[in-house]
Image: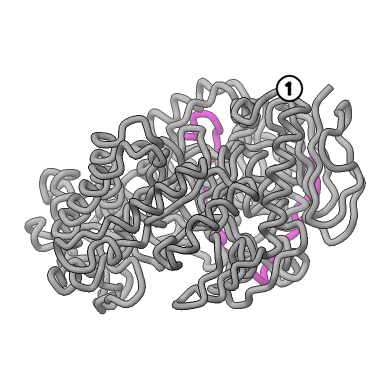
Amino acid sequence: MKLGVCYYPEHWPKSRWRADAEHMRKIGIEYVRVGEFSWSTIEPTPGELHWQWLDESLDILHENGLKVILGTPTATPPKWLVDRYPGMLAKDEQGRVRGFGSRRHYTFASLEYREECRRITSLMAQRYGQHPAVASWQTDNEFGCHDTILSYAEADLAAFHIWLKDKYGTIEVLNQAWGNVFWSMEYRSFDEIELPNLTVTEANPSHRVDFQRCCSDQVVAYNKLQVDILREHSAGRDLVHNYMGFFTAFDHHKVGQDLDVASWDTYPLGFLDQEVIYSEEEKHTYLRVGHPDFGAFHHDLYRGCGKGRLWIMEQQPGPVNWAPHNPTPADGAVRLWTWEAFSHGAELVSYFRWRQAPFAQEQMHAGLLRPDAEEAEAAKEAAQVAQEVVKLSAALGMDADELLSLPSAGKVALMFDYDACWSLDIQPQSRAYRYLFWCYRMYEGLRELGLSVDIIPSNAPLDTYQMLVLPAQAHISDDLLARLEAFDGVLLAGPRTGSKTSNYQIPENLAPGPLAKLMPLQVERVDALPNHTQMAVSGAWGEGLLKHWHEQIATDLPCLLKDNSGNPVLVGQGQHYYLGSCLDNGALKASLAKLAEKAGLETYYLPKGVRIRERGELIFVMNYASQTIDFAPEGAELVIGSRRLETANIAIWKKC
């Protein structure tokens, strides 16, 4: 359980560097991320390399016992490079060039830019690959930030043609897979295919989902290019990339296969304010602490993308600058978010950033230090966490490194599939429905019952779980079906599961497609509802409302919930259950509690805003609520905090 910080020595006078490093150690910082936006400082003119500033800053950090996460600077190519290769720039859906002047101004498909990335990454790796300060490398920065995965430039079209030929082999196979007989869309060759933008009306959804898959694969290849270089010149160092919140435009599981650790950048208040998933009541209630499940959802998602390893590369330390509104976190919130991350298995929490910049785009984004280099509130909370880690280590008889070995796996698995997300977002049928948000709400219901959850990809092993939730697994592959048949826990499949083939067509036997072998039912019709339309549901497993999506199900399975017309909503028996509608929180939570009981899992109906998470023998209790709560897990001994928790506070208990 380590603390880190993002640091930009190139932003400050050299006379400050040593004092900064000493101050970091005083707070309890052990890791420092450096370099990910520094290309123009390293190479201000083509071929003119200025390494001395980076040499000196790394040496100073090392002298102070700090470990460096060195970033490749490829998220911000310099102006001279753009002028040399203007074809490297991305284009938006309207065909407009996304030009120089901020960051992420490239398309992943540009072969010219990839060669420049190969060159600068090789130079950095050769120079610093064996530097004693460098413990890890970060590839690029925040793939896809500012909507930069889908690009419609000439390089993207060329890459798409190659990708399609590789997948389909012949144009006849593609025409059949896409259903191009519809609207006379048949092609004579791959070279006739254009990108799925600027069409008169909606482009073919099969065309669109394949383009999304292609763009995702460009990210995978781009990342692997850098990974291969870093492994050659800097063996033994962890390789990591920093993902983002509520972002699904590429397959993070595939990118993660080439890395050692998954990390992400967590900004609970910024995302609470800007995301439409949250109601006005939630935004008001959690204004200064963030939604109780925002951090947790992503911790569990990205731990699943990182082979079980998780870092937080950027943790919000104060007000940000990019949300519609930017409130100050509650006192204790930064500490709360840090411990929340550790409770989900994070090895490292790194704060963004060390010192608030007084210039450029992010000058209103807080850091651990104010612009005048005095400590902000978050620095004090980071220091408190560092002290508490020492206390926790002593209480458990472990050193800080041994704490990392505490198991973080949950007993419930929720399957999250990026391809399913693209499929259902491309034709959502209801503007009120989004795959990501439905997955999030199902996760929220599980967390409100006190369950520790793993979020897993569709190819993950299932044998360690007692309960498995498929929120909306659009395509059921033969491999997944075989593993579901062998799964001996309780299985819940949500609405839209099995509703598409791999080629984005409706299965011949209708939804749930192949899953009908386990759950004998058929979805005969769907009712895609606006937000203001909600229907009552009731039955043996509770009552509440359904919204957004409602399927008409034909089945002889026992009916556990029905709508107000008597139509089945939740059906199943034994180990297998199918939910054909999106339920409100109360009804969903009641049904999940029944399923957990069948799986032999203990549940709590936690107070509003309170969450618990188990990690090995530890139980973390976190209070996001606006009022003080009193909560103690049964059969546990208090280690840190108290049973009476004020807002934005935590307690850590040890199982007896």
Give the residue at the far front of this rendering: 15
Nearer to me, 424 or 249: 249
Note whether 557 is above or below 551 in the view shown.
Answer: above
Residue flagged by tag 1: what amino acid is it? Answer: Gly
Left of 474 or right of it: where is 151?
Answer: left
Nearer to me, 616 or 417: 616
Residue beneath the point at 40% across and 53% down: 57
Residue beneath the point at 88% across and 30% down: 634
The answer to whether residue 525 shows anywhere in this view is no
Tell me residue 547's x, y (percent): 65, 61
Left of 549 or right of it: where is 96?
Answer: left
Note whether 227 is above or below 319 in the view shown.
Answer: above
**Residue 542 shown in magenta:** yes
Q: Which residue is mark 1?
A: 397
The answer to whether residue 43 shows anywhere in this view is yes
Looking at the rendered structure, the secondary structure element under dot 1 is loop
Note whether 391 is above or below 166 in the view shown.
Answer: above
Tell me residue 111's x, y (percent): 15, 56
Residue beneath the point at 90% across and 55% down: 628
Tell me residue 321's x, y (percent): 55, 74
Left of 291 or right of it: where is 232?
Answer: left
Nearer to me, 356 or 577: 356
**Residue 215 shown in magenta:** no
Mark 1 surroundings: few (<14), some (14-19) or many (≥20) residues within 10 A: few
Where does the magenta region start and end? 515-544
